[in-house]
Image: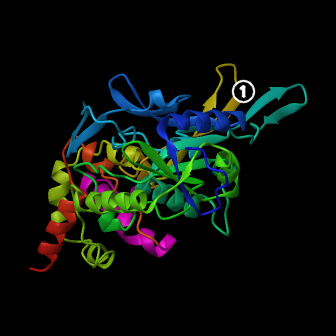
């Protein structure tokens, strides 16, 4: 029922689920493109949404090593499905982006630089692990000594409506990484879904202005305890676990272990794991020349350390084998990343396991490497 007072920053309110449409409309009125999970071509993608009815109502996702399937479970929740191959990275660090172009005229070469104006995105339904991944990429692209202007301009205009994850999938291990299933911070609004209402925790002044006169009620003790119980149960339902107590030392002290060769014999070096990973940031610069020689351009594109050409330098390839490239990926993700950025590069989302056609599971590989190293 409507309340006669205004919510406060940091408070948690409850809205009836249909009211969510009003919130989406206000975000669009404020100039945001509302992007959320929706089902297209029988899979889950992040795309523009305008209504709560476009969310994956009643769906869950069945995930295992090398396996993803959407299932209509018939429940009454909008945010129970665990994301698919896409991540929010594609909006902040686009797969392809023009850097500059050169055009020859009578006076020489004219430099054409694309404007840095970025779209304003409202991300709807950001899981705890995904928000942790965004924060990791913030450290990569917005360091004290370097700022990537493309990422920065997109990031500073992003509105984040995060979601506490109540139904982890079979490849999830966010509890092991300390990134979920409960969202800890860094959001504008955080949503916890109950049977009939959404609980909204207000994390920014911008969000406060958007929800201040929505029909709401204060979250009751019963609602809050129900949310806590849902989160406790979700933490117990993780499909995977990963012991990080001896990382990164385990990997960095065993770079010559023969087990890397065994993993390499199974890995296809297809780069699926890096393309679906929400934290990987390898990229390349490609130059394009017109046939008449009067125009040229350069674009930044996603790349992967599994690409043989990525490690090629004058004189040869520094990682000529698949096993060496897999070792580079995992030793960076769970090893040297911490030395460089103060955190491991994995958030436990499980995408690399789900979308690996060879069904390679890093949680298992680390466990076996630990056993091999102890012999």
Q: Find the magenta span and give its range.
A: 317-342
Q: Quadrant of residue 115?
A: top right
Image: 279 above or below 72? below
Q: Main secondary structure of the magenta part?
A: helix
Depth check: give the residue in front, 46 or 8.
Answer: 8
For the C terminus, the image quarter is bottom left
The percent position of residue 8, horizontal first and vertical second, equals 65, 60
Q: Is residue 114 left or right of residue 108?
A: left
The percent position of residue 302, horizontal first and vertical second, equals 49, 43
Residue at the outermost top position: 292
Residue 271 located within the stretch drawn in magenta: no
According to the picture, the residue beneath numbered tag 1 turns out to be 295
Residue at image coords 60%, 39%:
23
The percent position of residue 204, horizontal first and vertical second, equals 65, 58
On the question of residue 173 being in view, the answer is no
Residue at image coords 67%, 63%:
146
Give the structural element (helix, strand or loop) at label 1: strand
Q: Is residue 370 left or right of residue 277?
A: left
On the question of residue 79 being in view, the answer is yes
Residue at the outermost left position: 375
Depth check: give the residue in front, 218 or 187.
Answer: 218
The percent position of residue 89, horizontal first and vertical second, equals 50, 46
Image: 213 above or below 297? below
For the N terminus, the image quarter is top right
Residue at image coords 33%, 36%:
76
Depth check: give the residue in front, 319 or 153.
Answer: 153
């Amino acid at each position: 029922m409507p309340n006669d007072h205004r919510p406060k920053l940091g408070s948690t309110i409850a809205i009836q689920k249909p009211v969510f449409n009003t919130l989406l409309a206000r975000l669009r009125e404020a100039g945001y493109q509302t992007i959320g999970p929706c089902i297209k071509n029988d899979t889950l993608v992040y795309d523009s949404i305008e209504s709560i009815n476009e969310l994956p109502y009643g769906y869950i996702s069945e995930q295992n090593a090398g396996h993803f399937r959407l299932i209509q479970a018939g429940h009454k929740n909008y945010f129970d499905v665990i994301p698919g191959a896409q991540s929010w990275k594609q909006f902040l660090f686009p797969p392809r982006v023009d850097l500059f172009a050169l055009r020859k005229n009578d006076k020489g070469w004219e430099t054409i630089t694309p404007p840095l104006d970025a779209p304003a995105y409202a991300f709807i339904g950001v899981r705890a692990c995904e928000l942790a991944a965004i924060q990791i990429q913030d450290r990569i692209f917005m360091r004290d000594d370097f700022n990537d202007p493309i990422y920065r301009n997109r990031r500073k205009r992003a509105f984040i409506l995060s979601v506490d994850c109540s139904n982890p999938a079979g490849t999830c291990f966010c509890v092991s990484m300390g990134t979920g299933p409960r969202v800890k911070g860094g959001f504008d609004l955080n949503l916890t879904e109950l049977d009939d209402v959404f609980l909204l925790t207000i994390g920014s002044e911008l969000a406060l202005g958007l929800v201040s006169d929505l029909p709401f009620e204060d979250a009751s003790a019963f609602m809050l305890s129900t949310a806590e119980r849902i989160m406790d149960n979700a933490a117990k339902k993780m499909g995977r676990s990963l012991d990080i107590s001896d990382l990164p030392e385990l990997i960095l002290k065993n770079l010559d272990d023969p087990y890397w060769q065994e993993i390499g014999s199974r890995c296809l070096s297809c780069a699926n794991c890096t393309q679906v990973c929400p934290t990987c940031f390898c990229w390349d610069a490609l130059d394009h020349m017109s046939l008449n020689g009067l125009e040229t351009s350069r674009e930044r594109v996603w790349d992967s350390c599994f690409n043989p050409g990525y490690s090629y330098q004058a004189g040869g390839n520094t990682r000529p084998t698949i096993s060496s490239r897999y070792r580079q990926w995992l030793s960076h993700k769970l090893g040297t990343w911490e030395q460089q950025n103060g955190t491991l590069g994995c958030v436990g989302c499980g995408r690399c396991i789900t979308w690996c056609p060879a069904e390679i599971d890093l949680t298992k590989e680390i466990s076996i490497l630990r056993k091999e190293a102890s012999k």
